[in-house]
Image (cartoon, rainbow, N blue to C red):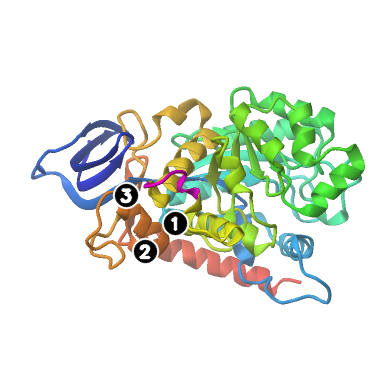
Amino acid sequence: MTTLWFETALLPQGWAERVRISAADGRISAVATGVAPAPTDERHGIAIPGLPNLHSHAFQRGIAGLTERRGPGADSFWSWRELMYGFLERMDAEEFEAVSALAYLEMLEGGFTHVGEFHYLHHDRGGVPYANPGELPERLAAAAALTGIGLTLLPVFYAHGGFGGADPAPRQRRFICDLEQYARIHEACRSAVRALPGAVVGVAPHSLRAVTAQELRGVAALAGTAPVHIHIAEQLKEVEDCLSWSGRRPLEWLLENAAVNARWCLVHATHGTVAELAEVARRGAVIGLCPITEASLGDGIFPGVAYQQYQGRFGVGSDSNVRIDAAEELRLLEYSQRLEHRARNVLAGAAGVSTGRALFDAALAGGWQALQPQAAAAAGLQSGAWLDLVTLRPEDPALMARAGDELLDSWIFSGGRAALDCVWRAGTRVVTGGVHRLRPEVLARYRRALGRLRGRT
C-alpha cells in the first residue's frame, strides 16, 4: 500500500485541498479530500495526472539536432525524411533499444506517463527480416520496463511508397511487410508487452500513401476493440498527391472509405478542412497533435479554432522526439493558434476559462481515449485508475503564490520542465527532483550506442 498526501491535487471533479491518495498494486484504491496528513503519508505540494503521449517514434530521439543544417534546395519534411532514413539504415537492435530507453526516460521526466509507440521499424539492416518477428517489439518492451513508462504499442503496416500501391523506395525496406507478415509482427507485439502493467497493442496503418484500400481494411480488422492510429494530411504535398490519385483529400477519402470511430486516432490532420474536421468530431475520433514536431518539420498550423467549435477531441504527442516536454507541447499548440489568429487565449473556449486547464483536460481525455479506449473513463486521479501522477514544485518561481488553474497556466506557459518534481507510474516513483532514478545507466547506454552509430558509415 502506498499513501501520498498533497496540499492540492487536480481530481476529475476539479482542484481539491489536503488530498490523500492510497494505492495498491499500482492502482488508486481511495482518494480522500480535506484530510490531515498521517504520520506514514509521503507529503508533497501539487499533484496533477500524468499526461499520455499519444504519438512517438522513439528511435528518432537519436537524430534530435542533427537535421538543422540547410541543404542545397528548400528543406522540408521530405528532405528531413531522407536524413532520418540514412540514420535508420545504420541502427542495430541494441542501439534501437538504447535510444528508445532514453526517449522514454525523458518522457517521464517531462510529465508524460504513458506513450503510444508508432512502431514501423520491423526488419534488420538491409531489410532482412529478423528470425524472431518480435525482436524489436521486445526491445521496446524492455525499454518501457526499464524506465517504467506505460506503453501502447502500435505496430505499423507499411507496404507502399506512394498512393495507389506504388512500389516502396529502397530506403523503406526496413519497414515493408505484407498482411501475412504484419499479422505475425502484431502477434509478436502482443507477446512482447504481456508482462507490462496496463500495456495495450493496437494497429497503425502508416498513412494512405503506404496502404491500399483493401490493406487498410485488413489492418483495421486486426484491431478488434484496440486503437487504430494513422498519419493523415500532415503535408500539403500529401494532400496534392492524394487528390491526383483519388480526387479526394486524405481526410475526405479516409472518412468515406473507413469506419472511423472513437477508437481511431488521426495523427496530425494539419491540412484538414472545416467540413472534414466537423465529421471527425461527429464520429468521436481523436486527432493526435504533435506541435513541436509539426513546427520542426514546417508542416503548418492545425486549424484548432475550427475544430474546437465542433467540440473535437485531441491529444498531444512528441512524435520525432526532437524535444520532449509535455508542457511545451501544450504551450506551442496554443501559441501557434495565437500567431495564426493574432489573438490571445485562443483555445480557452469561453470567457473566464483558464487556457492551461482547457488544454490539459483535453489532452488528458483525448490522449487516454487514443491509447486505452476501453479504460479512458478511468483516467486521472480517481479510484480504480493507475497511479500515474506528476508533482510540481510549489517553490518554483513560476508557481509561487498560485492556486487552482493558475498552477496549470503557470506550469504550461512559464515553468515547464523546471517546475516538475516527482513522477509515479503504476504506483512506482520513477522520477525524483526532476531526475529519473536510472538516468546515469540509461544515458551511458545511449552514449555508447550513439557513438557507434555516428562512427558507422
Residue 349 highlighted magenta (yes or no): yes
Q: Earlier in the sequence, mark 2 or mark 3?
A: 3
* Image quadrant in which the C terminus is located: bottom right
410 and 439: which one is in front? 410
Specify the quadrant of the image occupied by residue 14: top left
Q: What residue type is disc 2 on?
A: Gly
Q: Would residue 268 be found to the left or right of residue 374 on screen?
A: right
How far across and how far down the image is residue 118, in percent?
Answer: 63, 45
How far across and how far down the image is residue 399, in percent?
Answer: 28, 61
Question: Which numbered dot is residue 415?
Answer: 2
Crowd band around label 1 with a 10 angstrom C-alpha radius: few (<14), some (14–19), many (20+): many
Residue beneath label 3, please?
A: 405
Q: Is residue 64 above or below residue 21?
A: below
Residue beneath label 1, please?
A: 327
Q: What residue type is disc 1 on?
A: Ala
Disc 3/disc 1 C-alpha distance (Å): 14 Å
Name the chief secondary structure element in magenta.
Answer: loop
Q: Would residue 214 be found to the left or right of residue 61 on screen?
A: right
Q: Are marks 1 and 2 in contact (CB under 8 Å)?
A: yes
Crowd band around label 3 with a 10 angstrom C-alpha radius: few (<14), some (14–19), many (20+): some
What is the secondary structure assignment of the residue under circle 1? helix
How far across and how far down the image is residue 31, in percent?
Answer: 23, 33
Magenta span covers which residues? 347-352
Label 3 or label 1, whichever lies nearer to me, is 3
